[in-house]
Image (cartoon, grey):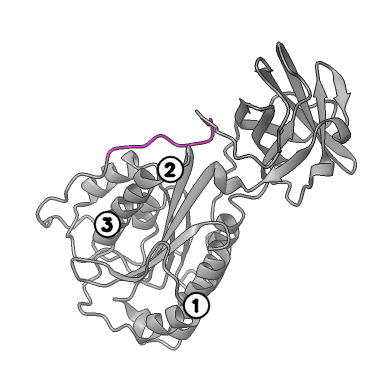
Amino acid sequence: MRPPALVALSLAVVSSVAVGCGGGTLKVTKLGASAQRPANVALYLSVFDKVGQPVGGLVPANFRVYEDKKLIPEGKAKRALLDTGIASTRYALLLVDMSGPMVDSEDLPDLAKAVGQFVDKVGVSQSVAVDVFDGGDEVAPLFGFGANMETAKIVDAVRKFRPRNRTTNLNGAVFQGLAALKEQLDQATTTEKGASLVVFTDRGDLAHSVNAAVLEQALKDTPVDVYVIATGEKVSRTEIAAIGHSGIVVSADPKAFKKGFDQVIAKLATASDGRYIFSYCTPKRKGDHTLRLEVAVPDDKGELSYEFSADSFKAGCTPKKRPSFSGLGGSKPSRPAPPPPPPPASDDDADDQGSDGR
């Protein structure tokens, strides 16, 4: 028998076109820009190093402003870094399977603890919700978007939940999760918005409430990133891979969910790392100008350019003014909501299978 093995979550960095490197290797990408009266210029940007890792922890001193090839000192152009929440909103929904062997195992307290860590760590930069599911037609909400609940109570709720039906409705839960996140994205007022659906399961779909083909189409149509953590002897890598198009963790070891949660949490908790809104007050009062913004760190740098008009600009600027961005290149387009599920399927293409322990 092949020993169980953890499948590392496959994560890819999606990059936009960086504008110039200025002799360094930092990849500085313009995600949005704004020039508005009285004299405000703001750039929403991302900064990655040469190996594709986000560069976090930058402060205003790391940014140098050049206008029309001339360095503009801070004394002539007040500047500030603004909250990136002005331009971007992200949602994360965690679905926890409570119909399988995990509910009766000694590992349930550790699973509940992992759910709590997800809420605490991902919730720092994203709006988080937690639902549990079993074999019922509807998921059971534990923690809604924007809710105010102590993490300890969420952990306790997971530990105490008892399944109403043990026939796992994995496909139905994922289908509902995609629809819930689509609703959140539609309501978001920021130009850039994104969402992630994270699913834990220790079995495959048994309820057949949503046909596998219908779920496949919903996954193709959604702008939502989907990650699946599937551990235990009864999970099928093929079935899980068809759902987790953004990343999967598959293992026959039922305890491997801990590493799976760690990987997904690390991915989502850093989703906003390396993103900044740099705002400054230009001394220009008329005409067209070229801004070159240089980002410098010890032993490396990068830059981007932005052309703006200073016509009608005047005194009275504060760099903390909220910028108005439009057409952010990093945002995902809204897609139609998943179609209503058809009557329960009669095919057996998603029956419970053993893990191949990839």
Tag 2 residue: 189
Residue 338 horizontal/vertical position (percent): 25, 45
Residue 203 lies in what quarter of the image? Answer: bottom left
Q: Write down the region rendered in magenta.
A: 327-336
- The answer to whether the residue labelled 1 contacts the one labelled 2, judged by CB atoms less than 8 Å apart, is no
> Horizontally, is 341 left or right of 94 in the view?
left
Discs 3/1, front: 1
Circle 1: residue type: Thr
Whether 328 is among the magenta residues is yes
Q: In this view of the protein, which residue sits in the foreground, 135 or 324?
A: 324
Q: Which is nearer the N-term, disc 1 or disc 2? A: 1
Residue 142 horizontal/vertical position (percent): 35, 73
Discs 1/2, front: 2
Circle 2: residue type: Thr
Whether 23 is among the magenta residues is no
Tag 3 residue: 176
- Going 86% across and 35% down the picture, which residue do you hit? 74
